Amino acid sequence: MRPASLFIVLFALTLSVLTFLLVPRLLNRPVEVQAAPAAVRIAAGDVLVAARPLPAGTILKASDVRWQRWPEEGLDANFVLRTKSDNAPQEHVGRVVLRGLSAGEPLTAQRVIKPGEAGFLAAALTPGMRAVSVGINVVSGDAGFIVPGDRVDVLLAERYDISYSNGQASANGVRPNHKAVNNVVLRDVRVLAIDQEVKDLEGKPKVAKTATLEVELTQAQKLALAPQMGTLSLALRSLARPETAENTGGIVQDIDVSAFLNNLVGKPAGGGTRVYRGAAAAEQSH
């Protein structure tokens, strides 16, 4: 046999022996299983979000917002974080939503506006409505307990001088010189702003001097004229809508309030007309 052929045979035999000896050992060797990586815990933060759908123009109340856990990877620099201000829900009361928010959507400085900032009232107004400010006091402003977002009726108290015709007097011969009346000027209007501040510790309201109301154009004209005619008062309405038709009110006179005055004055005697100077209507005797 030639040397080359002998070398090939010896190499093949050697390779066979090595395969016979090594392969079983490799097959019986335990396989190392790589452990799955441990779950990574994502840190989260409390973010101030809308507690319910908030349309544009909504004046925020404490119940309109809440804290919600938010993954750290989703946090935005514009979000309101609890770590920065734990009192943020109270701080946002009275602010106005510029663009509508869905329930659970984070609040940002770009979505709400603070009272006193440029455009605040315009943002709070319902499209097509106007804002008109009226003077109020302890009595007419419900002692300071009317707040933005409330709904009110506007009452006008007027006082007129009385003149008599044909020597006319009352049934008892009394001739009053003045007449007081009260009328509902506007019904169910929204309070946009009121410069009132409630102190957390003392719980005492600070009575405001003006209230800003949301009204239609014709209502705005009435509010502009009414203070020149008498004294305005605000009557706070329930936020719950009445289940039955409500009393729409009417003109209330001084004799309707005071039984004594009613008995004293009574109906005009002797016929003729009692005229209230400046009043739109006269009282006809029968």
Image (cartoon, helix red, strand yellow):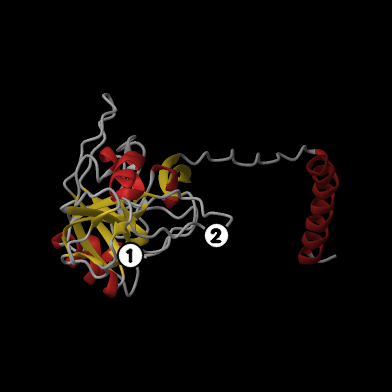
Q: Which residue is mark 2?
A: 245
Q: CA distance from mark 1 to mark 2?
A: 33 Å
| Outermost residue toward the top in this view | 202
Q: Secondary structure at mark 1?
A: loop
* Disc nearest the viewer among 1 and 2: 1
Percent x, y of residue 237:
41, 50
Q: Name the residue at 21% across, 36% down.
A: 206
Q: Position of residue 234 (x, y in %)?
A: 29, 50
Position of the C terminus, as image quadrant, is: bottom left
Can I make out residue 202 in this image?
yes
For residue 252, above or below residue 119: above
Which quadrant would residue 8 be assigned to in this image? Answer: bottom right
Q: Which residue is at the front of the view, 255 or 77?
A: 255
Q: Residue at x 32, y 49 (%)?
A: 255
State the residue at coordinates (44%, 58%). Answer: 54
> At which x and y percent is residue 170?
26, 54
Is residue 114 in view from this perspective? no
Which residue is identified by label 1? 285
Q: Residues within 10 Å of mark 2 (few under 14, many from 20)?
A: few
Quadrant in which the N terminus appears: bottom right
Towards the viewer: 101 or 73: 101
The quarter holding residue 228 reads: bottom left
Sequence-wise first label, 1 or 2: 2
Decide which of 142, 149 is in the foreground and name it: 142
Q: Is residue 160 above or below residue 87?
A: below
Q: Position of residue 239 (x, y in %)?
A: 46, 50
Amino acid type shown at disc 1? Ser
Tag 2: amino acid: Ala
Q: How many residues crowd mark 1 within 10 Å: few (<14), some (14–19), many (20+)?
A: few
Dividing the picture into quadrants, the one containing residue 197 is: top left
